[in-house]
Image: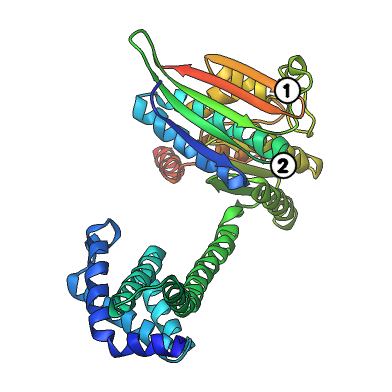
Amino acid sequence: MALQSCVNIKKEWDIVGARQMGRDIAREMGFGTVDQARIATAISELARNIYLYAGSGKVCFEKIDTIEKRGMCMIATDAGPGIVDIGQVMEDGFTTSSGLGAGLPGVRRLMDEFDIKSAKNVGTEIKAIKWLR
Amino acid sequence: MDRNLKRIAIENSDSIVQRWLEAIETLKEGSFTSNISDELFESTNREFVNVIFKSIQAEGSIEAVEVFSEKIITLGWPLSYITDGLQFFRRVTIEFILSQVDKLDSDYFSKVLTGVDNWIEPIIRQLVNEYTGSWEHIVSLQRVALQELSAPLMPVMDNITIMPLIGTIDTERAKLIMENLLEGVIRHNSEVVLIDITGVPVVDTMVAHHIIQAAEAVRLIGSTCILVGIRPEIAQTIVNLGIDLAKFPTKSSLQKGFKSALELTNRQINDLDQGVSDIEQMIQSLKGE
């Protein structure tokens, strides 16, 4: 794994900062505009979830550069209340904040790989990868 | 004791200044001052050190510090110049005073340390306060400016209004958009409102949610909302996210949106030339009779 860069999420405007950094990394790696938009949107969703539900946390980016595959990995971590029923939040239309409930399932569809770990009152870690084609 | 230290410092100000100038010269090799001319850097350094001495002599002469900080702020130099400069001054002065005595004991040492700290601290505090105060002021001004730009509404024709959105939409701005939109629809008596999102970099679920709510509210007061300026990559992410925008019409460009707005208000655009040639044809045909 290549070097990691992180953005702390504390205020609403940090979401924009995270998005900007992610988009820059994606552009630098050679992702097309559509994938850049996908990555930026996914970051936006994950960072907003941190801001809305956990209050604070961070989003980190890693460049994956191996012989077989190249890609970009994002890891969103927080020490918030955790997700009780992961199956439920991955369903379309489920929301606890009167939003659209498309955030997490949407991120899974936007990215190529998606992994979520969460424990009640401990926090949540979401890892998502987009491969460069 | 403190008076004694002060006397040493002031009497030997020349050599302290000399050392300080040498120390601050190293800052020049750092990043920020590389595009500043040597003369300006030197004259500012001299002014800086004069201000420090003045402040020490007068036990905190507030005015000189204020004038100097204002100057640094207008020049746009970083805060680190001030803090580094004062840090250097503290080090140089302590070194100098300690070098003046033959026999060092820990008691004298700590007295010198606290003495010099007491001179420097009020200056640091004031300069940093001035500096951050000015930044806070700028930030609050820009916030106001941004708010004025955030949700403009333009009546382009009778019953047709356009709201162009540029930049990131956060919660606060989404509220403003909703308010301005509804107020404007009533005030301009609009039948059709076009929301242009060409300049919105990312449409995530929150942004989409706010737009859907705004469109729904517009529908409730009897107008139609058309979402325009959906770029291809945005269209793809909206589909990936699984957001349903089927409740109101969407168009790729403002131009197309405007055309369908005209259709909705039972109007159309006619070429003027077309009209003229029609008349000419009529005249021709009249002549022929």
In the rendered view, would you say B85 is above or below A116?
below
Q: Disc 2 sits on a residue from what chain?
A: B
Left or right of A76, for residue A83 = right
Query: Could you tell me which residue is drawn at 63 percent across and 47 percent down?
Result: B160
Q: Is residue B263 visible?
A: no
Taking depth in this image into account, of B73 and B281 the one nearest to the observer is B73
SS at badge 2: helix
Q: Which residue is mark 2?
A: B214
Q: Are marks 2 and 1 on the same chain?
A: no
Query: Could you tell me which residue is drawn at 20 percent across and 69 percent down?
Result: B37
When asked about the image quadrant of residue A76, the answer is: top right
| Quadrant that contains the N terminus of chain A | top left
Query: Could you tell me which residue is drawn at 69 percent across and 31 percent down?
Result: B248
Q: Residues within 10 Å of mark 1 (few under 14, many from 20)?
A: some
Q: Which residue is mark 1?
A: A119
Q: Residues within 10 Å of mark 2 (few under 14, many from 20)?
A: many
Numbered-mark total = 2
Q: Amino acid at mark 2?
A: Ala
- The CA span between labels 2 and 1 is 36 Å
Query: Could you tell me which residue is drawn at 56 percent across and 44 percent down?
Result: A14
Give the percent coordinates (x, y) of residue B276.
43, 45
Residue A21 image label: none
In the rendered view, would you say B63 is above or below B115?
below
Give the percent coordinates (x, y) of residue A108.
60, 17
